[in-house]
């Protein structure tokens, strides 16, 4: 979400926006269980021009990030934010709190796929895989395999309470790529 103010000068716009942002942060912090779930992620002050490039006024803007664990509560938080100084809801993103664990599973699957592909290539070339020379979890373009590990979808209401805007949870895709190099051992 964002809080924004307009004025004849950059200093005036910033001075107008500061109390708006403080009020927004205080209101959200009062209803959030952890203070680190509400934070300012961007601040800007600059000219606001029309289509012809003529200066209209100056705009001060602060983007506030709010982390919500249950989608059911989103409507209440948005109501508080919009009544406490937020002028815009910038966007809603979805992230899984188990993404790191699933990332490790995806890396294991990617390694297994890379090894299986390398074994097939070695056999087709008349040999076998030797010792592992190098492995990394970043893409090595031209020699990597990837695997996807799906996260279970969480059942949530399609509409957040008290609002007419649908907010549905989205699936989160976690991917991993593995680059591995083995020694090729030719058959005698």
Image (spheres, rainbow, N blue to C red):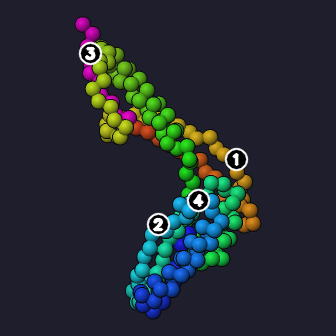
Q: Which mark is residue 155?
A: 1
Label 1 or label 3, whichever lies nearer to me, is: 1
Secondary structure predominantly adopted by residues drawn in magenta: strand
Q: Which image quadrant is residue 54 in?
A: bottom left
User: Residue 168: image x %, image y %?
Assistant: 66, 55
Residue at label 3? 185
Compare marks 1 and 3 and give the one earlier in the sequence: 1
Residue 68 position within the rendered picture, expressed as x and y whole percent measured from the top left? 61, 58
Between circles 2 and 1, the one closer to the viewer is 2
User: Which residue shows up at 70% across the image and 57% down it?
Assistant: 72
- Specify few, some or many for label 1: CA neighbours under 10 Å numbering under 14, 14-19, or 20 or more: few
- Identify the residue under disc 2: 41
The Cα atoms of the two marked residues, 1 and 4, are separated by: 24 Å
Check contact, mark 1 vs mark 3: CB within 8 A.
no
Q: Is residue 81 above or below residue 102?
A: below
Quick check: marks 2 and 1 in contact, CB under 8 Å? Answer: no
Answer whether residue 94 is visible to the viewer in this image.
yes
For disc 4, the marked residue is 34
Marks 2 and 4 close (CB-CB < 8 Å):
no
Question: First in sequence: mark 3 or mark 4?
Answer: 4
Separation (CA) of disc 3 from disc 4: 57 Å
Mark with earlier residue (2, 4)? 4
Distance, label 2 to label 3, CA atoms, is 53 Å
Q: Which mark lies nearer to you, 2 or 4?
A: 4
From the viewer's side, name the closer residue of 69 and 136.
69
Q: CA distance from mark 1 to mark 3?
A: 51 Å
Residue 51 visible to an observer of this rendering: no
User: Furthest-bottom residue in view?
Assistant: 8
Q: Please provide percent x and percent y for residue 176.
A: 44, 39
Magenta residues?
178-188
């Amino acid at each position: 979400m964002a809080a924004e103010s307009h004025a004849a000068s950059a200093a005036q716009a910033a001075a107008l926006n500061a109390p708006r942002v403080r009020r927004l942060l205080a209101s959200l912090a009062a209803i959030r269980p952890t203070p680190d779930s509400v934070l300012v992620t961007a601040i800007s002050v600059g000219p606001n021009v029309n289509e012809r490039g003529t200066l209209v006024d100056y705009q001060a803007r602060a983007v506030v990030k709010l982390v919500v664990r249950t989608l059911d509560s989103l409507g209440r938080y948005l109501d508080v934010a919009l009544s406490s100084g937020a002028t815009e809801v910038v966007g809603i993103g979805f992230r899984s709190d188990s993404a790191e664990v699933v990332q490790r599973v995806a890396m294991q699957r990617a390694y297994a796929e890379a090894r299986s592909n390398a074994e097939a290539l070695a056999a087709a070339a008349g040999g076998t895989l030797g010792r592992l020379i190098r492995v990394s979890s970043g893409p090595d373009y031209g020699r990597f395999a990837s695997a996807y590990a799906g996260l279970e979808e969480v059942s949530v209401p399609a509409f957040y309470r008290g609002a007419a805007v649908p907010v549905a949870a989205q699936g989160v895709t976690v991917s991993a790529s593995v680059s591995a190099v083995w020694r090729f051992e030719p058959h005698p």
